[in-house]
Amino acid sequence: MTDVKTRIDETVKANDVVLFMKGTKEMPQCGFSSRVAGVLNYIGLEYTDVNVLADEEIRQGIKEYSDWPTIPQLYVKGEFVGGCDIITEMTLSGELDGLFEQNGISFDKDAANKIREANA
């Protein structure tokens, strides 16, 4: 576990935004990963995607790393933010915008507003 924990830790700390997901941002392999990647892609956010299906050690290790049982998992500036339900709620409440702004991460605010308008 130490080796995989080190690999995960280095990935999380080396990138401003990381999404551990099933599939890739271009081709998600599950509905929950698709929803989170869809939001991040739509708002034009630059992020690193890690396909847990391509590496069984990462797939299991990320759950232990975060003490969170499900995938996808979003990290911002080295901190675990949450999975699909939490990211969805934060997107709709505007909390995710605030988190990105607070951390100096650029995204399309108009696109984020359109998501909220469409779900109002």
Image (cartoon, rainbow, N blue to C red):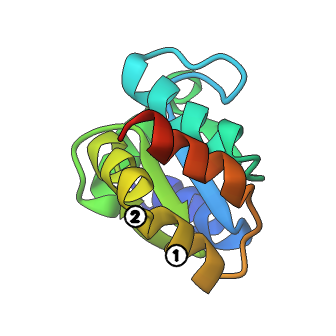
Q: Looking at the image, is 34 positioned above or below residue 110? A: above
- The residue tagged with tag 1: helix, strand or loop? helix
Residue visible at 35% across and 39% down in the picture: 60
The answer to which quarter of the image holds residue 14 is: bottom right
Q: How crowded is mark 2: few (under 14 residues within 10 Å), some or many (20 or more)?
A: some
Q: Looking at the image, is 29 positioned above or below residue 55? A: above
Q: Which of marks 2 and 1 is in front?
A: 1
Q: Quadrant of the N terminus?
A: bottom left
Q: Looking at the image, is 62 positioned above or below residue 5? A: above
Q: Which amino acid does label 1 sit on?
A: Gly
**Residue corresponding to mark 1:** 98
Closest to the observer, 69 or 97: 97
Residue visible at 46% across and 29% down in the picture: 35
- List x then y, in percent, for residue 47: 71, 51
**Residue corresponding to mark 2:** 81
Q: Real-space Cα distance between discs 2 and 1?
A: 13 Å
